[in-house]
Each structure stands twice: as structure tokens, then as C-alpha cells.
Image (cartoon, grey):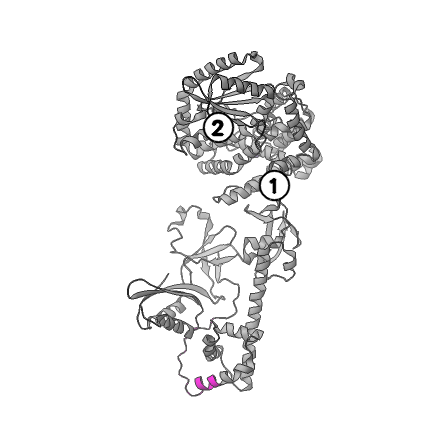
Amino acid sequence: MSKYDDIVHYQDYEELVRILKESNNNYDMRKIQKAYNLAEKAHGDQRRISGIPYILHPTSVACIVAGFGMDTDSVIAALLHDVVEDTEYSLDYLRKEFGKDVANIVDGVTKISKIKLYSREEQQAENVRKMLIAMSNDIRVIIVKLADRVHNMRTIECMPEQKRRDKSRENMEVFAPIAHRLGMKAVKEELEDLSLRYLDPIGYKEIEDALMLRENEREKFIEKKKKEILKASKMPAGKIYVSGRVKSINSIYRKTILRGKTMDEIYDFFALRIIVDDIKECYNILGVIHDLYNPIPRRFKDYISTPKPNMYQSLHTTVIDSEGIPFEVQIRTWEMHQTAENGIAAHWKYKLGFTRIVNNKKAKELDANINRIRDVLQAQIDTDDSTDIIRNIRNDFDQNEVYVFSPKGDVFNLPNGSTVIDLAYLIHTEVGNHMVGAKVDHRIVPIDYKLKTGEICEILTQKDSHPRRDWLEICKTSSARSKIRQWFKRERRDENIVEGKMMIERELKRSNIYLEDEQLEDLLSFMLRKNKFNTVEDLYASVGYGGIQLWKVMPRIKEEYALKFKPHEDEPVISKPKPARHRRITSGVIVDGMDDCLIKFSHCCNPLPGDEIIGYITRGFGVSIHKRNCTNIPKDISKAEEPERYVSVRWEEEIKQSNFRANLEIICTDRTGLLADVTIALSSMRIFIHTLNSRHITEDQAIVVATIDVVDKEHLETVINRLKSIKDVISIRRF
Ligand code: MN
């Protein structure tokens, strides 16, 4: 038995009408009835998973919203919140029939429900929270969404286990913190408690049972304190309201189970709340309490003179009675109480000129202090509709950021003023390099389009497209700019390589020397080490842009030619096709069911053509290719955490990409010159070396680790065999 067991799961329209009438607020009942009629018609005979008519969900949400004391448009938006998403009625229709505010709230709620909220990364959760607040240009969006969440949690029992846990985690990570931020304590506690029930059913039950055990004891204690305080205050019973306060299960859970304390060690396990009419009386009562019991030093907090950022106000103190039992006391006015429970929603009333909420008769006797606080709030609210309240509340959120999401619901966080180019490069360098355009909210936008929070942005790419120089002027982030620059540098390099090679060939032709590419590279290999080049490409590039002046080196090249090719031509040539030197972007891998997706070869296992492979769909970085037996890939995919992310892939029949990385581990007897021998062997085979390191493993053994480019598995075997023939090499292993 908990306080949530009594909650009515579904409330119908009649109930809503009753709540609205009892509220004493001026609701536009005609308009609300019209909204209900539409919702009823639109949802027709749709049913919830439990089999209950769907319409009872929006009416229940509307009841919760009305319970906060929200205005007519909020109640209407609550009634219609699922209409645009789930039925044939459009946003434009709602705008025409109910005005732009209602349409805007419904639109916001619909958008939020499309975002993928739960993620394992804390950073992402923070982004999502920030974005939800930022994208709610009208705070009522969040309030209606929270009510929707609360109702879904109340009725989540019939959902499958995994769904309940996912939703519960979303609540803990995203919605409860937002409710807290908006001061909506009742919502926060209900979301947390109902979620905890699914996330840790055993812990939840433990606390619930412990609370039950102490319930009698607690009630007696509270009754006794009530009497003592009433007597000491000398106030008439109607002027002071004293009640026991049960802490939320989640807050006890965090103090006991998570911090290893026992229930008896929690100070404020016994807690009293005293509500009076004005601020002066709050401080009077505090005096009474401190006379009556012994205050615990440093446990007094005055949130009346210094309200919490979410507007919460109260006096807190912890005292010990004559029997040595500590208990916490909260003292506040009715108005503060309303704010403490419903936060921002409570303040909504002022904007609407609603009558006071709880204690109407005291309206005229408002304490000067309350007036002051109210004036501040009023001022904030009046300056510029609701956006200002939210601006005030999220003052710790960076205004200089925008949050947009991908069609799949991933959230990306960019500086204000960022364009679709910045987003493309943020997603992945290759996405940026191949971007041809972008769609925002499903419409094509120009390339200099500046993104706004809450927009869904899809980057359009094409395999053979590339960046343009004017992007450098358009993009906002320096990371995008540097990636574009890098691309141009690399691209120029390719042009330079072609140019340099042609220049050398032209010069040789003049001497009637015609060589195959392989022979040419072989001829030029003598120049590499001298000029500290790794590959012959570096040499070509250097010639191409004029770093090496050809007229200076041509005589030496011709000399070398005479030496190498003319007298004896028995130099063994490795019988492998020369790797195509132009790195095409084609990946060589086909992903079943996906054309033209981004491919990345994983560096954990460096798959080669010929290996059995599998693809893994990453978050925002395309498909990464692993060897099937890579240690990072589960043996049984069906038992993987997210099996749907694994896709079957295969090598293209004809691989256009020339270079694949392979890691080699060479164990050898240590001697001087060994590393040099390996380097020479590799460069004689024209193997591009990415890294080459060696270290001792025993007194006389060393391990050389090399990352090299090879064409495929067969090529790698040739390379390994060649390396094995080096003196003192003991074994070679690919990893
Ligand atoms: Mn809903």
C-alpha cells in the first residue's frame, strides 16, 4: 500500500468539468466542450493497449493539467495533445478552430514525443533536458507534456516490462529533473516514485514495507506534536494548519539504499509541515518551535528571504524533542505551499488574473513581502508572455546554444548561429564532406540555413559530392572550418600527386624512357629515405607543388635508371596488383538493405577483404565494419543488447578501395638493425606504414607492432611471408 495506490487511473470528461467548476477559475467552458467533442470524434474507437477507450487518456491528462490550475488553452491542448499525431486532424485545423496558442502547445508536445529521450550517456541526457526546455517557447508545452507523462506512468502496468523500464529511466533522467527545475514537486515525486517501482521493485517494496511498519508510530508522534504546537502558538485552529509529511519513497531510497543509512538514521523521517496565512506568522511559528524543542545547529534554512531558483519558499528547521527524537519542520504560507507543490504552474494563475487558489478570504490581507515577491513574478510575466518566465528559470542554461535533432531522434548541440554545414560536420566528417544539401522539418533549406532549437534536420549526402570553398565563409564552428580546410589540403595533395607523377613521366619520355607504374616507383624508391618521404606519393606530391625541383633531380634519376634497369632486369617484382593510388571513397563493402551509407572500418580488428565481416550501426557515424570474430562483437547476436544494430554486410565483388589497415605483431630476437630490416622489407614491397614501434618483452626478445596498408587478405599473407624471411624473426601474428 502506498499513497499512489489510491490514485484514480482514468478520469473522464464529467470529472474534468467538475474539477474546472470547483476551481473557481474563469474557464471558457464552451471552448473546452468543443475541444472535447473534437477529441472524442478524432480518437473514435481507438483504444489504449489495456483496452480502455483512448479518449480517457486525454481527459485524464486534462484533469491533471486542470489540477495544477492551468488556463483554458492548456486544458484544451491537453484534450487534443494526441490528436495531430494519431488522427487525421492537422495542426492547421487546430489553429483555425482553437487559436495559435493551442496549436503551438499541441505541436510542441507532439515534437517532444518524437525525440529519442533515453540514452546511456549522461551528456546526452543533459542535452535532452536543455533542449526540451529551450524548445518550449511556451512553458505550457512542458506542463502538458509532464501531465501526459504522469498519466502514462499511472497506467503503464499493462505495458511490456522493457517499455516500463525505458519510460521509467526517461523519467528519472529527463522529466523528473525538469519538473524539479520548474518547482513542480508533486509531479517530480510522483514520476520518481512510480519509476522507481519499475527500476528497483525490491528496493521500492523494502521502503514501502518499512514505512508501513512505522505508520502507527508516526501518526501518534505527529498527533502529539500537533497538539503541543497548537497550544504553544496560541493561535486559533483555523489560522494554523499542521500536518505530518511523508517523504517520497524515492528520496528515502536515495538516503537509505544508495547511501547505506538505515531508516532510523534519517533526520527528517518524521516531518511536520505548518502552513499559516502570512510571512510574519511563519517567523513567529519558527520562534515557537525553537522554544518548544532543541534546534539542531546548521539545519535551519531560510528559503523565504532567499527562495530557491525554482521559486520554492519555506523555512526549514530540524529539532529534537524531549525524548530525543529528531524531526524536520517546514513552515510556509498557503501561497508558498501552492508554489512548492506545483511550481511554475501555480504562478500561471497570476498571469491569468485568476482568484487566489487556496485561501480566498485572505486575499486582501496579503503580507507586504508576498506582494513584493508577487510583483517580481508579475513583472517577469508581464514583460513578454510566458517566454520570460522560462528564460528566467533556465538562466543557467546557455542561451548561446541550439539543440536540433536528427530524423532518428539523436540530439545535437551547436553554438547559436550554426548552419546545416556545421551540423553535417558535427555528425561526421564524411557526412560533411559529402553533403549536398539539407532538409529541416522535411523541407529543403539553403546551405546557409541557420538552425533553430527543436528542428529536425536531415543532412543529404551524395557519394561523389565534395565541399565548396565558400562553405568556409558560411559555417559558424571552427571545427567545421578546419575539417573543410583539411579536405582541401588533402584534395590538393591528390591533384599534386597526379601532377608530379606526370611531370616525372614527361621528363623521362624525353629520354625515351617508358616505365610501368611499378617500375617507376621502384626506380624512385632510392629518393624516399634521403628526402624523408614515406611513400612515393609524397615524392610525387612534392614534385607536383614544386617542393622538389625536377631539373635538379632528373640527372640523378636517369643515373639510377641506368644502374637499375639497363644492365640486369632480374629484380623480383611482387606479383600483386599495384594498389590504385587514388583513394576513392567507395568503401568496398555492401550493407544489405542500405545504399550509400557511411562505412568505417573498425580499428579494433581491421577487417580485410576476404575476412568474414559484420556491420554495426553506430550512433551518428554510419556503419562500422568488424571481423565476425572480433572480440567486440557478441558471439550470439540475438543475445546482444541491441541486436537490431547489427547488420549483415559483404565485400564488394570488385574492391575499388585499395588500402585496408592491418595490425601485425612481430616477435623477434632483439638485435640492432632489426627495425630497419623490417622497414626496408616493407618499403621494398611498397607497403604504406602507418605506425611501427618496438619494445622489449624479455631480456633478449622484442616485439614489433606495425600498422600497414594492404590490398586484401592474400596480399597480407604475402607480406607476412616476406617478413618471416627476415633474420631473427620468430613469429608474426595479425591482430
Ligand atoms: Mn499522450
On the image, numbered disc 2 is attached to which residue? 298
**Residue 350 sits above or below residue 440 on the image:** above
Mark 2: C-beta under 8 Å from nearest atom of ligand 1: no
Residue drawn at 64 percent across, 62 percent down: 469
- Quarter of the image that includes the N terminus: top left
Q: Nearer the viewer, residue 652 or 197?
A: 197
Q: Residues within 10 Å of mark 1 (few under 14, many from 20)?
A: many
Magenta segment, principal secondary structure?
Answer: loop
Q: Amino acid at mark 1?
A: Ala
Q: Between label 1 and label 2, give the one nearer the viewer.
A: 2
Q: Which residues are magenta?
A: 559-579
- Quarter of the image that includes the C terminus: bottom left
**Residue 643 sits above or below residue 708 on the image:** above
**Residue 662 sits above or below residue 725 on the image:** above
Mark 1: C-beta under 8 Å from nearest atom of ligand 1: no
Q: Is residue 123 left or right of residue 700?
A: right
Which image quadrant is residue 673 in?
bottom left
Q: Nearer the viewer, residue 53 or 586?
A: 586
Residue drawn at 55 percent across, 43 percent down: 127
Q: Residues within 10 Å of mark 2 (few under 14, many from 20)?
A: few
Q: Amino acid at mark 2?
A: Arg
Q: Is residue 572 magenta?
A: yes
What is the total number of numbered labels drawn onto the structure image? Answer: 2
Residue occupying the far bottom of the picture? 567
Relative image position of residue 259 (x, y in whole percent): 41, 33
Q: Which tag, 1 or 2, sits closer to the chain's start?
A: 1
Q: Is residue 724 left or right of residue 188?
A: left
Relative image position of residue 715 (x, y in whole percent): 40, 69
Q: Secondary structure at mark 2?
A: loop
Q: CA distance from mark 1 to mark 2?
A: 37 Å
On the image, numbered disc 1 is attached to which residue? 134
**Residue 595 sits above or below residue 638 on the image:** below
